Image: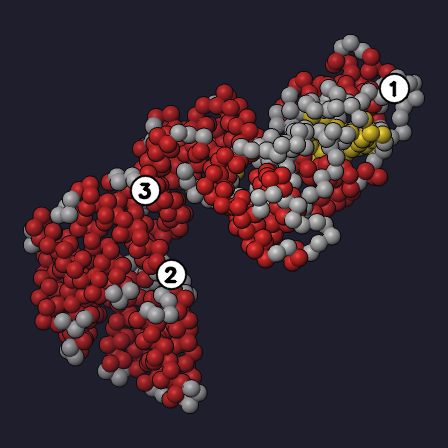
Amino acid sequence: MVDEQQPSVRQEISGEFNATSVFGNPSVHYHQAPVSSEPPEHVWMIPYRRNPHFTGREHILQQLHSSFLTDRAAVLTQGQAISGLGGVGKTQIVVEYAYQHRDDYRFVLWINAASPSTLTADFLSIAHHLQLPQRVEQEEAQVVAAVRHWLATHDGWLLIVDNADDLPLVWPLLPTGSTGHVLLTTRNQHVGKMQGFWIDALPLSEGITFLLRRAGLLTRSMALEQVPFEDRVKAEELVRLMGSFPLALDQAGAYIEETSCGLARYLALYQHRQFTLLQRRGGIAGEHPDSVTTTWFLSFEKIDHTRPEAREMLHLCAFLAPDAIPEEILAKGAAVLEPTLANVLSDPLIFDDVMVLLQAYSLVLRDGQRHTLRMHRLVQEVLRESMDPAMQRVWAERVIRAVEAACPPVEHRFWSVWEQIVEQALVCERWVRAYHLHLPEAAHLLQQTGWYLAERARYSEAEPLLTSALTISEQIRGKEHLHTAASLYYLAGLYRNQGKYEQAEPLYERALTIREQELGSQHLDTATSLNNLGLIYRDQGMYEQAEPLLQQALAIREQQLGPQHLDTAITLGSLAGLYRNQGQHAQAESLYKRSLAIREQQLGPQHPDTAISLYYLAELYRDQGKYEQAESLHLRALAIREQQLGLQHPRTATSLTNLARLYQDQGKYEQAEAFMRRALAIYEQRLGEQHPYTMEVRKNYNVLLQTMKRA
């Protein structure tokens, strides 16, 4: 399953084996057919033995064969191309195709197009095997022309052109309008008018099978289930770590087979010595291709020689999440990068030129519709490990600054942007920890990402980021700094969203103290802290402590922002909730309606914050037995949350829970049971079995079932 660069010790040519050693360039050492005026009936020039470990790729082999048979007009004039990253198994696929279909052709011809010299040498070799009269010509161009003419005027042949990475060199030499089949392998993703087949890493199941076969632990006569369970588990873990990349799996299997170290030991070694093992090949001469690192270093060197700034792009991508790197992040982060790379990222034409080069070696894949890039995780590993620790730190810091510069505010209208950024930000958190990069940009990036995750109810992912942001801010700015107050505020908000009031309260208190001291009692940020600390007191039933804080926050916001501002609406809702809890329904209703009107006007009727106002006003009506009004508002809020937040968001579950209670109050038990069952499932999945919200809903659900006599 790998791109082999060396032929086997024994070559089968014209139906006979050549025992001559053929290490090195297979073109130079082909067995020369005897001089004869009679053309041969059959020629077989495949320089590799059939791979006994070949696994999977059936769909590619079937597509190749089907295309040669059914799309005859296209393949006769253009041929077919197998494209992919070096080491992904392109050569092995075409070799396997040749062996599977050798009876379909009288002439199976091979050209190694790795360089002009190998290309020319193999044309000469073909001329000798076909016994062409021009084979004795001194002018190579005449021999090449003779081979092309023969291909154009004969049928029953398959021409495999391997390693055709320099397509402009190869195109003029391929036959046109012929009646045979051309099959080409290249690292270049763009193959012109040829029919292209992109080859990616193996599917997980095929990767596991291939590794076990290569390691000698699974024969073709065995079922996978016959391999010990522990070996299958370790194989799967190793395949996942290697991104199911064929050449890496081949190296691992060869090492395990030769050393008899076993999968468990190799896995332990790989987890600590990954780069070293990726450099190793098997010890049996001629049986194994170059290592992963050697294969890719050759591409890196060619890129560096052709366009040095392209190598910089590779380094940048090596420190980002591999599967979907948004081009928008790169463009927005360009300003904080060093000048050479900033020039590439800020100029679309230069960026496109660099992408053409990187795609020519399949080191980066570009999705033009989604505007994202992709790089295999092993390519990233090799690139990173080829740097010394100081340079790794430099690039990690650059990536953190670039991603931070691309982050928008954590607002609902930017959620689609955050969905693209969040995986990159999570990778940056890894570099913050690995290289102890306590930077202002790192603190801000972790804080914003953590809050976005909290808003999407991904609480377990959010907490370590918000905690790290607070720690970094305290270290680089001090415990009394305003940025530290912001970090305290967001971490407290995470705890409040989960009902962890005791953990949230001291953080809110610290943030308020800092803001009052640094900004004064009338500042808007102070009002924010007053509002949120008041909410914590309110939610814990500490009404006498909560009311003056909320009244003060409302006064500041109305005075400085105006009565129609969204922040004013927030505090109106907070104070309304306090009055509702105290049974002061008229005061609560007036404030809830004011808050709802502001949000509908400023945000629109379908915004998640509008749903918050709808929800709380509905609950107030339920408290008063105004069921029809309550139901209408709750259903509106639920529809907004399902659409905007998703069917599995905890706030969606909250709407479901309170609708269930509304129906339960009216004796509509079947409707209540359906809504509460949905809510419980969401809470169990998103918050956990032991979360207070989950436990409360489960208790209420059991009471409902007892009422329905179903418990």
- Find the distance from the CA under tag 2 to the CA under tag 3: 32 Å
- Find disc 3 in the rendering and name its residue: 432
Q: Nearer the viewer, mark 2 or mark 1?
A: 1
Which residue is located at x 42 percent, y 86 percent?
711
- Find disc 1 in the rendering and name its residue: 34
Q: Position of residue 443 (x, y in %)?
A: 26, 44
- Find the distance from the CA under tag 1 to the CA under tag 3: 67 Å
Q: Earlier in the sequence, mark 1 or mark 3?
A: 1
Depth check: give the residue in front, 693 or 243.
243
Q: Earlier in the sequence, mark 2 or mark 3?
A: 3
Residues tagged 1 and 3 counted as in contact (Cβ below 8 A) = no
| Residue 656 figure quarter | bottom left
For disc 1, the neighbor class at 10 Å (few under 14, some 14 to 19, many from 20) is: few
- Find the distance from the CA under tag 2 to the CA under tag 1: 76 Å
Residue 83 in sight in this render: no
Q: Secondary structure at mark 3?
A: helix
Which residue is located at x 82 percent, y 12 percent?
136
- Find disc 2 in the rendering and name its residue: 644
In the rendered image, the residue lying farthest to the top is 138
Q: Amino acid at mark 2?
A: Gln
For disc 3, the neighbor class at 10 Å (few under 14, some 14 to 19, many from 20) is: many
Q: Is residue 144 above or below residue 237?
A: above
Depth check: give the residue in front, 534 or 569.
534
Q: Secondary structure at mark 1?
A: loop
